[in-house]
């Protein structure tokens, strides 16, 4: 301490607090990093869309079965799906879009080394593409989160 300065005017020494001279403050730690959620929010959104994509088309399929008989005549179903220009438009749109997305799903699942692609593809055929595609996106989000956790060492 220099004689011309009062204790309040003295510069702080290493480790001293400005609240009380001579008191060393607790070590300041960085704020904890919030952990990455186990399942990202988008994965849940895709899962909800998958459920809707399984239920809504099958409600229409159920109506078809009740209206046209207990058997599910695939040939008649396809003929009705192309019965007018509006139905043709939707059918062709689904066919092209589903083909492109299915190719991407196969390539992406191999790139990310995902599990469950066989179940996803089977569900696209047996339940609905509107079920299988969002299911794939759900599984993909989970896989990306898993890879991120592995990369960050968590």
Image: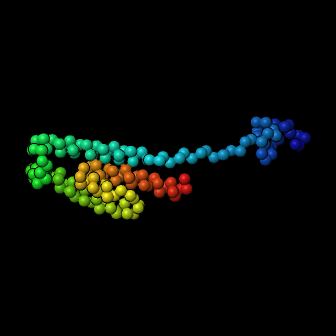
- Residue at x-position 14% and y-position 49%: 72
- Residue at x-position 27% and y-position 55%: 122
- Number of labels in the image equals 0
Frontmost residue, 71 versus 16: 71
Determine if residue 111 is in view. Answer: yes
Rendering coords of residue 5 (x, y %):
86, 39
Residue pushed farthest front?
A: 70
Looking at the image, is 10 positioned above or below residue 145?
above
Task: Give left or right: position of 33 versus 90.
Answer: right
Q: How is the image coloured?
A: rainbow
Rendering coords of residue 103 (x, y %):
29, 62
Rendering coords of residue 116 (x, y %):
36, 56
- Residue at x-position 43% and y-position 55%: 144
Determine if residue 85 is in view. Answer: no
Residue pushed farthest right?
A: 3
- Residue at x-position 79% and y-position 36%: 20
Rendering coords of residue 12 (x, y %):
79, 43
């Amino acid at each position: 301490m220099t004689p011309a300065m009062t204790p309040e005017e003295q510069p702080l020494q290493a480790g001293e607090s400005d609240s009380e001279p001579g008191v060393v403050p607790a070590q300041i730690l960085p704020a904890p990093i919030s952990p990455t959620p186990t399942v990202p929010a988008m994965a849940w959104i895709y899962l909800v869309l998958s459920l809707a994509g399984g239920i809504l088309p099958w409600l229409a399929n159920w109506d078809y079965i009740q209206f046209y008989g207990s058997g599910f005549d695939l040939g008649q179903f396809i003929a009705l799906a192309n019965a007018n220009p509006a139905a043709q438009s939707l059918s062709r749109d689904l066919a092209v879009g589903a083909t492109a997305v299915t190719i991407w799903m196969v390539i992406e699942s191999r790139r990310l080394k995902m599990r469950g692609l066989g179940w996803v593809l089977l569900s696209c055929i047996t339940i609905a593409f509107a079920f299988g595609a969002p299911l794939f996106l759900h599984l993909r989000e989970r896989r990306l989160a898993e890879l991120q956790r592995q990369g960050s060492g968590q």
